Image: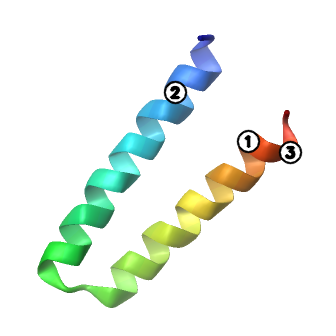
């Protein structure tokens, strides 16, 4: 695994932790923002393949 992949993986893990917290506290707006960021990361990584 190269450095960029490791950074992306850690970033996704961090966002998933935040999403879990947002779900726990019931913050729908924050959940939507986090999901949007995760989608952006996924699209960016898909295009670079």
What percent of the width, then of the height, locates residue 6? 52, 21
Check disc 1 and report its element: helix, strand or loop. helix
Image quadrant occupied by the C terminus: top right
On the rendered structure, is 11 left or right of 27? right
Answer few, some or many: residues within 10 Å of disc 3's Cα (few below 14, many 20 plus, some between 14 and 19).
Answer: few
Answer few, some or many: residues within 10 Å of disc 1's Cα (few below 14, many 20 plus, some between 14 and 19).
Answer: few
Q: Which residue is mark 2?
A: 7
What percent of the width, then of the height, locates residue 43? 74, 54
Gap between marks 1 and 3 measured at Cα: 5 Å
Q: Which is more N-terminal, label 1 or label 2? A: 2
What percent of the width, then of the height, locates residue 30? 35, 79
Residue 19, placed above or below residue 13: below
The residue at the point 73 percent across, 41 percent down is: 45
Gap between marks 2 and 1 measured at Cα: 12 Å
Gap between marks 3 and 2 measured at Cα: 17 Å
Q: Which residue is mark 1?
A: 45
Residue 11, placed above or below residue 39: above
Check disc 3 and report its element: helix, strand or loop. helix
On the rendered structure, is 26 left or right of 4? left
Q: Nearer the viewer, mark 3 or mark 2?
A: 3
The residue at the point 24 percent across, 73 percent down is: 22
Labelled pair 1, 3 in contact (Cβ < 8 Å): yes
Q: Which residue is mark 3?
A: 47
């Amino acid at each position: 695994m190269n450095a960029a992949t490791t950074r992306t993986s850690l970033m996704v893990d961090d966002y998933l932790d935040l999403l879990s917290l947002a779900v726990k506290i019931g913050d729908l707006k924050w959940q939507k923002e986090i999901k949007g960021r995760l989608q952006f990361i996924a699209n960016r990584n898909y295009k670079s393949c």
